[in-house]
Amino acid sequence: MRVPFFLTGVLFAFTAWGTLIEHWGNFEPTEGVAFAFWGALSLIAIIGLRFPVKMLPILLLQFGYKILWIAAVGYPLMSRGELDAAGQALLHANAAGALIDAIAIPWLFVARTYVIDAVSDSAHEPSP
Protein backbone atom coordinates (compact mmCIF):
# COMPACT_ATOMS: atom_id res chain seq x y z
CA MET A 1 0.00 0.00 0.00
CA ARG A 2 2.95 2.32 0.39
CA VAL A 3 3.57 2.47 -3.38
CA PRO A 4 0.46 4.52 -4.20
CA PHE A 5 1.07 6.71 -1.16
CA PHE A 6 4.64 7.33 -2.33
CA LEU A 7 3.59 8.04 -5.91
CA THR A 8 0.81 10.36 -4.78
CA GLY A 9 3.00 12.11 -2.23
CA VAL A 10 5.89 12.68 -4.62
CA LEU A 11 4.23 13.11 -8.02
CA PHE A 12 1.35 15.24 -6.80
CA ALA A 13 3.71 17.26 -4.64
CA PHE A 14 5.72 18.33 -7.67
CA THR A 15 2.84 18.89 -10.06
CA ALA A 16 0.20 20.27 -7.70
CA TRP A 17 2.43 22.38 -5.48
CA GLY A 18 4.46 23.63 -8.44
CA THR A 19 1.27 24.76 -10.16
CA LEU A 20 -0.23 26.17 -6.95
CA ILE A 21 2.87 28.26 -6.25
CA GLU A 22 3.29 29.37 -9.87
CA HIS A 23 -0.36 30.43 -10.30
CA TRP A 24 -1.10 31.54 -6.71
CA GLY A 25 -4.17 33.78 -6.81
CA ASN A 26 -4.75 33.33 -10.55
CA PHE A 27 -6.91 30.20 -10.86
CA GLU A 28 -10.34 29.65 -12.25
CA PRO A 29 -12.39 28.43 -9.25
CA THR A 30 -12.89 24.82 -10.40
CA GLU A 31 -9.31 24.45 -11.56
CA GLY A 32 -8.16 25.88 -8.23
CA VAL A 33 -10.23 23.31 -6.32
CA ALA A 34 -8.58 20.49 -8.26
CA PHE A 35 -5.03 21.70 -7.57
CA ALA A 36 -5.81 22.48 -3.92
CA PHE A 37 -7.25 18.98 -3.52
CA TRP A 38 -4.19 17.37 -5.13
CA GLY A 39 -1.87 19.49 -2.98
CA ALA A 40 -3.65 18.43 0.20
CA LEU A 41 -3.77 14.84 -1.02
CA SER A 42 0.01 14.86 -1.54
CA LEU A 43 0.54 15.93 2.08
CA ILE A 44 -1.85 13.30 3.43
CA ALA A 45 -0.23 10.63 1.25
CA ILE A 46 3.07 11.28 3.00
CA ILE A 47 1.35 10.38 6.28
CA GLY A 48 0.16 7.21 4.53
CA LEU A 49 3.77 6.16 4.05
CA ARG A 50 4.08 5.85 7.83
CA PHE A 51 0.54 4.64 8.60
CA PRO A 52 -0.77 2.86 5.49
CA VAL A 53 -3.65 0.95 7.12
CA LYS A 54 -4.89 3.99 9.03
CA MET A 55 -4.81 6.02 5.82
CA LEU A 56 -6.56 3.35 3.72
CA PRO A 57 -9.68 5.55 3.28
CA ILE A 58 -7.44 7.99 1.39
CA LEU A 59 -6.55 5.25 -1.10
CA LEU A 60 -10.24 4.44 -1.45
CA LEU A 61 -11.01 8.11 -2.11
CA GLN A 62 -8.19 8.29 -4.63
CA PHE A 63 -9.37 5.14 -6.40
CA GLY A 64 -12.97 6.35 -6.36
CA TYR A 65 -12.37 9.77 -7.85
CA LYS A 66 -10.23 8.31 -10.64
CA ILE A 67 -12.83 5.71 -11.56
CA LEU A 68 -15.61 8.31 -11.43
CA TRP A 69 -13.63 10.71 -13.63
CA ILE A 70 -12.95 7.97 -16.16
CA ALA A 71 -16.61 6.88 -16.23
CA ALA A 72 -18.28 10.31 -16.10
CA VAL A 73 -15.81 12.51 -17.99
CA GLY A 74 -12.99 10.73 -19.79
CA TYR A 75 -14.78 7.84 -21.44
CA PRO A 76 -17.80 9.85 -22.65
CA LEU A 77 -15.52 12.48 -24.21
CA MET A 78 -13.35 9.78 -25.79
CA SER A 79 -16.36 7.88 -27.17
CA ARG A 80 -17.60 11.08 -28.84
CA GLY A 81 -14.14 11.84 -30.25
CA GLU A 82 -13.94 15.04 -28.18
CA LEU A 83 -11.00 14.16 -25.93
CA ASP A 84 -8.04 16.41 -26.70
CA ALA A 85 -4.39 15.50 -26.12
CA ALA A 86 -4.41 16.83 -22.54
CA GLY A 87 -7.58 14.89 -21.81
CA GLN A 88 -6.07 11.71 -23.28
CA ALA A 89 -3.02 12.13 -21.05
CA LEU A 90 -5.31 12.62 -18.05
CA LEU A 91 -7.35 9.56 -19.02
CA HIS A 92 -4.19 7.44 -19.22
CA ALA A 93 -2.85 8.82 -15.93
CA ASN A 94 -6.15 8.16 -14.14
CA ALA A 95 -6.39 4.66 -15.61
CA ALA A 96 -2.82 3.82 -14.56
CA GLY A 97 -3.37 5.31 -11.11
CA ALA A 98 -6.65 3.47 -10.63
CA LEU A 99 -4.95 0.21 -11.63
CA ILE A 100 -2.12 0.78 -9.13
CA ASP A 101 -4.65 1.65 -6.43
CA ALA A 102 -6.80 -1.41 -7.26
CA ILE A 103 -3.77 -3.68 -6.93
CA ALA A 104 -2.54 -2.06 -3.70
CA ILE A 105 -5.86 -1.87 -1.85
CA PRO A 106 -6.48 -4.94 0.33
CA TRP A 107 -10.05 -5.51 -0.86
CA LEU A 108 -10.84 -8.36 1.55
CA PHE A 109 -9.77 -6.16 4.47
CA VAL A 110 -11.91 -3.33 3.06
CA ALA A 111 -14.91 -5.64 2.78
CA ARG A 112 -14.45 -7.00 6.30
CA THR A 113 -13.73 -3.64 7.92
CA TYR A 114 -16.04 -1.26 6.10
CA VAL A 115 -18.87 -3.49 4.94
CA ILE A 116 -19.26 -6.67 6.98
CA ASP A 117 -18.21 -5.21 10.35
CA ALA A 118 -20.25 -2.07 9.72
CA VAL A 119 -23.37 -4.11 8.96
CA SER A 120 -22.90 -6.40 11.95
CA ASP A 121 -22.17 -3.43 14.25
CA SER A 122 -25.33 -1.65 13.17
CA ALA A 123 -27.36 -4.82 13.73
CA HIS A 124 -26.18 -4.95 17.37
CA GLU A 125 -26.80 -1.29 18.19
CA PRO A 126 -29.83 -0.58 20.35
CA SER A 127 -32.58 1.29 18.57
CA PRO A 128 -33.44 4.77 19.88
Image (spheres, grey):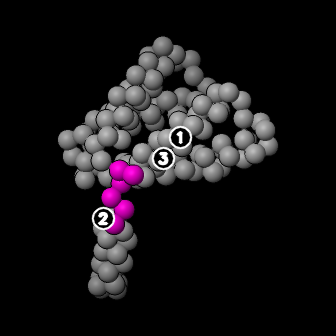
96 within the magenta span: no
Neighbours of disc 2 within 10 Å: few (<14), some (14-19), many (20+): few
Q: Is residue 69 left or right of residue 101?
A: right
Amino acid carrying mark 3 in the image: Ala
Label 2 vs 1, first from the N-terminus: 1
Amino acid carrying mark 1 in the image: Asn
Q: Residue furthest top?
A: 22
Disc number for residue 98? 3
* Alpha carbon separation for disc pair 3 and 2: 18 Å
Image quadrant containing the C terminus: bottom left
Residue drawn at (40%, 22%) of the image? 14
Q: Is residue 26 left or right of residue 119?
A: right
Residue at disc 3, secondary structure: helix
Residue drawn at (58%, 34%) of the image? 90
Residue 43 appearing in the image? yes
Residue 43: give x, y in percent of width and height: 32, 33
Q: Is residue 82 left or right of residue 37?
A: right
Disc number for residue 109? 2
Disc number for residue 94? 1
Amino acid carrying mark 2 in the image: Phe
